[in-house]
Amino acid sequence: MSAITQQEVAERAGVGLDFVTRLIDAGALAPAGDGTFTEGDVRRARVYRGLEGAGLPIEVLVDAIDRGELAFDFLDLSVYDRFSALGPRTFRDVSEEMGIPLELLVVVREAMGLAQAGADDQMREDELEVAPLIQELLSKAFDPAVIERLLRVYGDSLRRIAETEADWWRNQLALPYLRSGMNAAEMLRDTAEWAGEFTSRIERTLLAIYHANQEHTWNEALIEEIEEALERAGLRSRMEVTPAICFLDITGFTRLTEERGDEAAADLAARLTPLVLRSAERHGGRVVKWLGDGVMFHFHEPTGGVVAALEMVDAISAAGLPPAHVGLHTGPVVFQGGDYFGRTVNLAARIGEYAAPGQVLVTQEIVDRVVSNGIAF
């Protein structure tokens, strides 16, 4: 670990020098023989500041540590290097140096789930890692509003992942350890030692899933561009029999997850699965993939898709589940990597978004190709 001064501890932790002195006097921080400190001490200073702000006196915390009931020594482990310290430059400084509008730069902190920043607040080191991307996008004439949306989507998605991790860490690790007879200090040390290797595996998993999603979306965009180019050139042939793509979504699924948790969402998915599988298979369709709040289907021809969609909506309602809404479109699709791509897929998804609860909404192309079979539009 690199040695840092008491002044640097204060600056990097975002606390006053007098607060660090108080921690030393109370025995909460212990400098090395040469009077220097470590990055772990920076993290401890931030934790102590937060706890004191919550009404817990430093002396009480130190007493708990002395009794062996509490511990912060695990903050020296390298896995906690991901906890970012403050850098020397403010948002205003970086805005002026890099030519990034200040109102866009401060969005970085909000995207990270932290309190809104002021122009003269010091930027965190991890926030500084984001600034070059913003600068590059601006140099390519990206709309600042688009960049802001990108940052907020990144932040919202990753925050949900982090919150889910924290929830299972507490319920699957921390609480069982405490119930087994460990005290808080023992539990924190034990889980921290294991966390290093485990978090590395999580990060590799997240990156693998991210790359797979990139492959899917990039292929989707590429194929749509190819289809449009062929159409402009008059080379996109009309197929006599076209498949149908169907998107079924459960109304209010996201709200249900937020209000009742992932367990309720999993129960809903388990009840939904047999209802939709039976109808799809009976009418020449198959599940392409399960989405967060619904399902994507491929049908060999449009009539089967429409009949199955009507059956599924009715069956879901009869089972007492939240109402479903469905969108269907027919046309050429490209199969690649176990998935379907192209304009037909994109239009079916958009149609599904317009459908009202309990409604099956289709395009004119579906109407033109469906053999009546008693179906009315």
Image (cartoon, grey):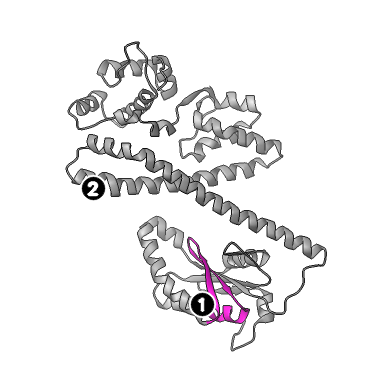
Asked if marks 2 and 1 touch (Cβ < 8 Å), the reply is no
Within 10 Å of disc 2 (Cα), the crowding (few <14, some 14-19, many 20+) is: few
Q: Is residue 240 left or right of residue 33?
A: right
Which badge, 2 or 1, is on the more N-terminal residue? 2
Q: Residue 376: percent from the left, percent from the top?
A: 61, 84
Residue 318's place in the image compared with 95, above or below, is: below
Q: Residue 332: percent from the left, percent from the top?
A: 68, 70
Which residue type does callout 1 highlight? Answer: Ala
Position of the N terminus by quadrant: top left
Position of the C terminus by quadrant: bottom right
Q: Residue 159: percent from the left, percent from the top?
A: 45, 45
The residue that disc 1 covers is 280
Q: Which mark is residue 219?
A: none
The residue that disc 2 covers is 176
Residue 120 shows up from this direction: yes
Q: Residue 256: percent from the left, percent from the top?
A: 41, 60
Secondary structure of the residue carrying tag 1 is: helix
Whether 299 is among the magenta residues is yes
Which residue type does callout 2 highlight? Answer: Pro
User: Residue shown at 39%/76% (left/top)?
Assistant: 319
Residue extending farthest right? 233
Q: Is residue 338 left or right of residue 318?
A: right
Whether 350 is among the magenta residues is no
Secondary structure of the residue carrying tag 2 is: helix
User: Residue shown at 62%/42% (left/top)?
Assistant: 147
User: Residue shown at 31%/12% (left/top)?
Assistant: 33
Q: Is residue 142 left or right of residue 271?
A: right
Within 10 Å of disc 1 (Cα), the crowding (few <14, some 14-19, many 20+) is: many
Span colored in magenta? 283-308
Q: Is residue 88 left or right of residue 27?
A: right
Q: CA distance from mark 2 to mark 1?
A: 43 Å
